[in-house]
């Protein structure tokens, strides 16, 4: 409920914030020859700072929403464990979770190592030029 309220408040305020932000960028006196360059740069970077703050708050809100959804999914899975047939499936997953976790760690290690080797071996090709693209 708290996430929904925060998201609603952010959604309702977004139009005013966007208009204010665009207004800050538009009001930077780039063509005014009486203004010093430092004043123009300060006005521009004040607008950039405002934009970064708004983007950071939106990113934080999205992260909170993501983890809320994950927790809700876990609760739904646990709630379905009451049914006899789905309970067997859920119990199997919970008992195998430790093995799945260790498999994921081993898989990621092998995957990253393979990406490093491919980037080192075939680095002249665009699809292997760095570690991120070779993954």
Image (spheres, rainbow, N blue to C red):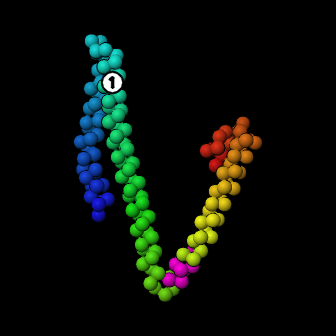
For the point 49% across and 87% down, the residue is: 84
Residue 10 horizontal/vertical position (percent):
28, 50
Specify the quadrant that holds the N terminus: bottom left
Are there few (<14), some (14-19), or many (20+) residues within 10 Å of tag 1? few
Residue 23 against residue 111 in the figure, above or below: above
SS at mark 1 in the image:
helix
Q: Residue furthest top?
A: 34
Residue 91 against residue 2 in the figure, above or below: below
Residue 105 against residue 94 in the figure, above or below: above
**Residue bearing mark 1:** 42
| Residue 19 painted magenta | no
Residue 107 horizontal/vertical position (percent):
66, 60
Task: Specify whether 86 is left or right of 50.
Answer: right
Asked whether residue 127 is in view, the answer is no
Q: Nearer the viewer, residue 57 or 20?
A: 57
Residue 5 horizontal/vertical position (percent):
27, 58
Mainly helix, strand or loop, the magenta region?
helix
Count of marks placed on residues: 1
For the point 36% across and 52% down, the residue is: 61
Task: Specify whether 36 is left or right of 89.
Answer: left
Q: Which stretch is magenta?
A: 87-93
């Amino acid at each position: 409920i708290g996430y929904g309220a925060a998201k609603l408040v952010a959604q309702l305020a977004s139009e005013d914030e966007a208009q204010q932000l665009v207004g800050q960028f538009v009001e930077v006196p780039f063509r005014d020859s009486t203004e010093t360059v430092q004043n123009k740069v300060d006005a521009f970077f004040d607008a950039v700072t405002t934009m970064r703050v708004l983007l950071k708050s939106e990113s934080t809100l999205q992260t909170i929403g993501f983890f809320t959804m994950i927790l809700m999914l876990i609760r739904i899975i646990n709630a379905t464990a009451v049914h006899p047939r789905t309970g067997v499936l859920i119990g199997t997953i919970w008992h195998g979770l430790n093995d799945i976790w260790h498999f994921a760690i081993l898989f990621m290690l092998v995957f990253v190592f393979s990406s490093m080797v491919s980037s080192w071996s075939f680095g002249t090709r665009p699809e292997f030029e760095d570690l991120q693209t070779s993954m």
